Image (tube, rainbow, N blue to C red):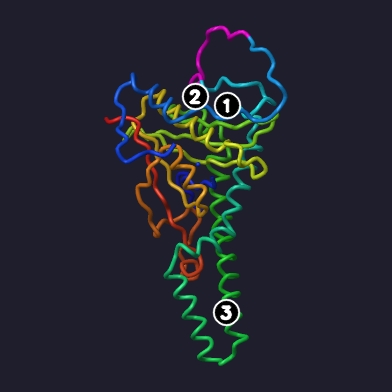
Amino acid sequence: MHCGPPDMVCETKIVATEDHEALPGAKKDALLAAAMWPPLPAAPGPAAAPAAPPPAPGPQPRGGAGDAGPPEGRGVHIREFRPAEQEAARRIFYDGIMERIPNTAFRGLRQHPRAQLLYALLAVLCFALTRSLLLTCLVPAGLLGLRYYYSRKVVLAYLDCALHTDMADIEQYYMKPPGSCFWVAVLDGNVVGIVAARAHEADNTVELLRMSVDSRFRGKGIAKALGRKVLEFALVHNYSAVVLGTTAVKVAAHKLYESLGFRHMGSSDHYVLPGMTLSLAERLFFQVRYHRYRLQLREE
């Protein structure tokens, strides 16, 4: 199976006003960061120990000074990925994408009125041919079952592509190339969230992708902290904008992106997810809506 470049398909998300101007120049970058990203509330835990003396000057990691954070076990700490965390990152990514199966099959149907109309017509046709209320009532259950089957089929194919491309070797794909990075959220010494950034030099933008948070630790602001890390990375490296694409169905995911300052740039019902075969049955029982978001940091 041919797998193209990884696309953002994340399950996760300050609202940008319509008159919010792009901020040219490094002088306003700090103002932008301060306005957009107020400090997150500290996670509940034991009383903080006295502050340690500042570390000796040294080379900064590619994520900037923001990688310095509280010691593990004292709240959420966002830092760069380490090779030993490969399997933990893959597990969080896998679990997050697997949640898409029921979401796409059932909740996602609300986004596709044509599919709803087709299914209703099939139920009417069944009644017209059989005059059986029992068989007619079984039609919706059968259609939803087919939607679940094809959602699972496509999502598993997509996962196979991802787990054999960039997620197969995070260090090689994200940590070594310039303009790319991968971060993990650590809580009590455990990896509980991930996010990646990949630069597009042609238009001087950074793509946010692979964002996912362990379902046991959601609602703690971890996803927003991960998103801020990517925005800080883009500011530090003088990129003009941060972009992302998502097929997320949950409203909470889109509210997250908007809360970080992203603007919705449009959507498409004709997006081909890696792993799709575009067979007739797949077209009938699997649909996704692809959304594009952009956060302009400065004018070129």
Q: CA distance from mark 3 to mark 2?
A: 53 Å
Across and down, in percent, residue 196 comes to: 51, 35
Residue carrying label 2: 63
Q: Earlier in the sequence, mark 3 or mark 1?
A: 1
Across and down, in percent, residue 81 comes to: 58, 29
Q: Which residues are magenta?
A: 53-65
Q: Earlier in the sequence, mark 1 or mark 2?
A: 2
Q: Are marks 1 and 2 in contact (CB under 8 Å)?
A: yes
The three-letter code of the residue at mark 2 reads: Gly
Label 2 residue SS: loop
Q: Which mark is residue 79?
A: 1
Q: Is residue 32 left or right of residue 70?
A: left
Q: Which mark is residue 139?
A: 3
Residue 229 appears in the picture as rendered: yes
The three-letter code of the residue at mark 1 reads: Arg
Identify the residue shown where x is 49% and y is 81%. Answer: 122
Identify the residue shown where x is 69% and y is 32%. Answer: 190
- Where 182 falls versus 28 (above or below)? below
Across and down, in percent, residue 108 comes to: 51, 61
Label 1 crowd (10 A; few <14 / some 14-19 / many >=20)? many
